[in-house]
Amino acid sequence: MYVPAHFEIQDVRLMYDIMEQNGFATLVSQHQGRPFATHLPLTLDRENGCLLGHFARPNPQWTDLEGQEALVIFQGPHCYISPSWYETGTSVPTWNYVAVHVYGRVQMVHDTEETLSAMQDLVVKYEASDSPYKLADVDAAYLAGLSKGVQGFRIGITRMEGKAKLSQNHPAKRQELVIQRLEQLNRENENQIAALMRQNFAARGGQ
């Protein structure tokens, strides 16, 4: 990923936070000599530095993925930035966004219990706190059949790249104008980018 120095995220914990907050990722690898991508939820194991997930077994990507270095893309909030907000005629449109790229070797997981445990972690993460659903309550025979239809995997993280393009390359006054405009829009991505811009602006002392 192209990451100019002023957009680079160097804090590993911050990159982990972004990955956990945006866990529906894109896994890219080579399949039969061509790029192949799957969109899927992943669980981050911070302690062991790895990602856990599973494929539907009919998905061919997993069949030659063992041992490959894969790329996993975590896309955070993003939005369009209009040059009309800058109050200047010497600018062009751009896009603000946050993203983390993760690289690592893929290992297939053939232990059914380990795969079900990773699925349980996804349920715990995404089910509402007051939800009555519990994976442990699902019929054991049904779960056994389900496990035959998926292929678990683990990606040992070897390298990460983080990028937060939040108008840091613009003067402070221009950044504040962009934040104000984004805050006026009743859209989730725009509001999240505005909040991140404010945090970054404050962290840098308004510079």
Image: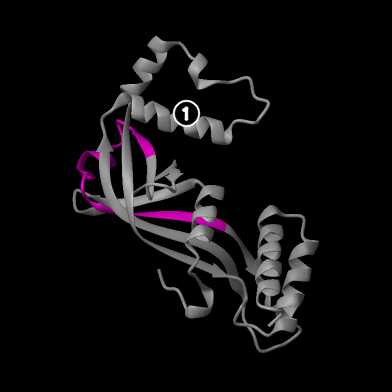
Tell me what residue is drawn at x 77 percent, y 63 percent.
Answer: 183
Q: State the image quarter where residue 42 is shown.
A: top left
Residue 11, compared with residue 3, is above or below; it is above
Q: Position of residue 6 (x, y in %)?
A: 53, 79
Quadrant assignment for the N terminus: bottom left
- Most foreground residue, 157 or 176: 157
Which residue type carries mark 1? Gln
Region of the chain picked out in magenta, as a range: 53-76
Q: Which residue is mark 1?
A: 120
Q: Position of residue 127 (x, y in %)?
A: 59, 30
Q: Position of residue 79 (x, y in %)?
A: 62, 63
Residue 172, compared with residue 155, is above or below; it is below
Tell me what residue is drawn at x 34 percent, y 22 percent.
Answer: 147
Tell me what residue is drawn at x 69 percent, y 53 percent.
Answer: 188
Left or right, 66 with respect to 130, comes to left
Residue 169, compared with residue 36, is above or below; it is below
